[in-house]
């Protein structure tokens, strides 16, 4: 799902597709490419799925921001991979999770350039220290995850742009999921959506609720 934040508030659904988690983005972005090329600065907030950028590669200049909501939650999964070294709710687990939430806590409305630079520098130092802590305690998966996310962590802040999380998209997708899930057992197989049918139904509903189309 691809949504745009509106100046007047709220969001507009700019693209929708149903398929595998990794992939399908090129077709989703295609109708919006002409409009996207008119932006001087185009901020794309993602959950870290690198295939999203494949749909825009070489066509649109993009500033990427990792979703600051996803980072702590995905970090929990990385720590789960490292569970033989760090048990859940152990002192080490609590230390790393408290640090990651603190690094992700970035308030909006900061305009002073010197303050922004100092804030980013401080948070990068804390992130570097956290990565080293993970390495020292055998949490290789958690350390690698943080290293991969580091480059796109503070993009919105350093460019003074709005957009830190994909929370609005998550809420929208939850609503869609609740409307699509009719039945999960074999008894209801005859009532299951086809991919095209589900996509068409969702497009109509979302256009009505978010894009101002009275279908």
Image (cartoon, helix red, strand yellow):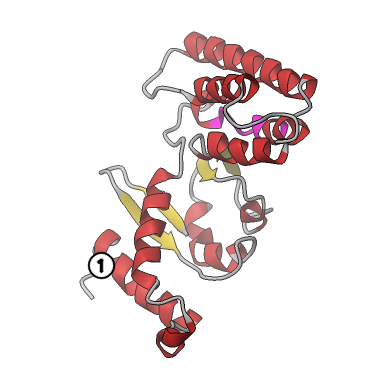
**Among the 4 quarters of the image, the one containing residue 71:** top right
Question: Element under label 1?
Answer: helix
At a point 50% along the width and 53% down the height, the residue shown is: 36
Residues in magenta, as a range: 147-155
Residue 66 visible in the displayed image: no
Q: Is residue 37 or residue 115 the one in the foreground? A: 115
Q: Residue at label 1?
A: 208
Q: Give the percent coordinates (x, y) of residue 102.
A: 51, 20
Residue 160 visible in the displayed image: yes
**In the current view of this chain or complex, which residue is farthest to the left?**
214
At a point 40% along the width and 18% down the height, the residue shown is: 110
Residue 96 sits inside the magenta stretch: no
Vertical relation: 132 (above or below) 56: above
Q: Give the percent coordinates (x, y) of residue 130.
A: 67, 19
Q: Give the percent coordinates (x, y) of residue 127.
A: 64, 20
At a point 59% along the width and 40% down the height, the residue shown is: 74
Q: Give the percent coordinates (x, y) of residue 119.
A: 53, 13
At a point 69% along the width and 29% down the height, the residue shown is: 86
């Amino acid at each position: 799902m691809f949504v745009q934040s509106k100046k007047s508030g709220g969001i507009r659904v700019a693209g929708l597709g149903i398929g595998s988690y990794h992939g399908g983005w090129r077709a989703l972005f295609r109708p919006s490419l002409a409009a996207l090329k008119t932006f001087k600065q185009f901020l794309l907030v993602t959950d870290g799925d690198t295939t999203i950028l494949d749909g825009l590669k070489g066509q649109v200049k993009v500033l990427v921001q990792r979703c600051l909501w996803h980072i702590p939650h995905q970090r929990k999964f990385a720590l789960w991979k490292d569970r033989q070294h760090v048990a859940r709710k152990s002192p080490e687990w609590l230390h790393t999770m408290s640090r990651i939430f603190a690094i992700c806590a970035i308030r909006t409305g900061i305009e002073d350039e010197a303050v922004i630079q100092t804030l980013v520098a401080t948070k990068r130092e804390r992130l570097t220290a956290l990565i080293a802590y993970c390495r020292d305690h055998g949490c290789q998966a958690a350390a690698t995850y943080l290293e991969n996310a580091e480059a796109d962590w503070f993009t919105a802040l350093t460019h003074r742009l709005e957009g830190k999380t994909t929370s609005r998209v998550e809420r929208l997708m939850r609503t869609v999921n609740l409307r699509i899930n009719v039945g999960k057992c074999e008894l209801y197989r005859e009532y299951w959506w086809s991919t095209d049918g589900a996509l068409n139904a969702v497009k109509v509903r979302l256009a009505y609720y978010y894009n101002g189309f009275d279908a």
